[in-house]
Amino acid sequence: MAEKGSMEDFLAVAVDAAKKAGEIIRSGFYETKHVEHKGQVDLVTETDKACEELIFNFLKEQFPDHKFIGEETTAANGVTKLTDEPTWIVDPLDGTTNFVHGFPFVCVSIGLTIGRVPTVGVVYNPIMDELFTAVRGQGAHLNGKPIKASSQTELVKSLLATEAGTKRDKSTLDATTNRINSLLFKVRSLRMSGSCALNLCGVAAGRLDLFYEVGFGGPWDVAAGALIVTEAGGLVFDPSGKDFDITSQRVAASNSFLKDTFIEALQQSE
């Protein structure tokens, strides 16, 4: 057993929490959902809430001195301030719309920051039984096997992921679709899988070459996935090309070869 407070211990506990929450998601996936609306198209279910409660209780039992930021509780109270304290940042069910529709791209995302730096990341898709993990400086893994970002060097041969977001006002949608139209001329194809965390893991595993999203929910969507990308040899940055800020609700990711051309294409698409 890893000593309490070691990186191995943090990872082991996060994996346990993700798998316990995954059981709730898996059992709820094939049942009738009780859905609430957070916005016009932004949904929350009983499963989201049950998973967050389970994860936080489990983590607090192990690490009572740590801080916690979660989508369904902290965010609802408008509190997402990230400090230097060890902080668990949790999305109990990323891809709630997919969950409601029975589309199998759903996951638990658990990230740990220390000194505001992502240090441990776990993303678990219980429907496909895929467990993505990373510890800072120790590489990224899928179901225990090392993963690497792609080696694609040409934008035109790249697979890009993004999301439409949850806002449905005309100006936001026009900006979103205009950007997508511009980028579609420059890449091989586009995917919208409905989960920011799994899109990041897709870049880490070399399934996707590029990903960007602006205006997602908060740090819980990216805390684990961003670390998994960088530990897989990929890059995470702001779509403008500036440094990535975990609290900014803006993210872009690519393999190590495409960053500059991708940023240029994103700037041209504005």
Image: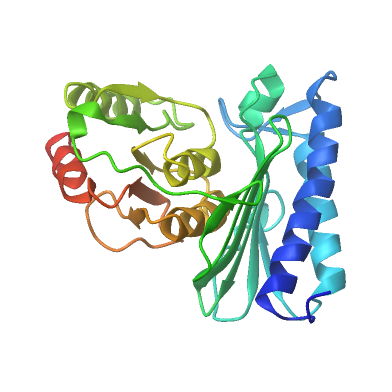
Is 80 situated above or below 220? below
Residue name at image x 54 percent, y 48 percent: 221
Q: Which quadrant of the figure has residue 233? A: bottom left
173 to the left or right of 264? right
Residue name at image x 29 percent, y 28 percent: 171
- Residue 218 position, x and y percent, is 52, 52
Is 40 situated above or below 74? above
Is 85 situated above or below 197? below
- Residue 47 position, x and y percent, is 80, 36
Picture quarter with the C terminus? top left
Instruction: Give the image's coloring scheme.
Output: rainbow
- Residue 130 position, x and y percent, is 66, 39
Looking at the image, can residue 96 be seen? yes
Residue name at image x 42 percent, y 59 percent: 230
Looking at the image, can residue 219 be seen? no
Q: Residue furthest front?
A: 145
Picture quarter with the N terminus? bottom right
258 to the left or right of 238? left
Name the residue nearer the viewer: 8 or 95. Answer: 8
Name the residue nearer the viewer: 186 or 88. Answer: 186
Q: Which quadrant of the figure has residue 40? A: top right
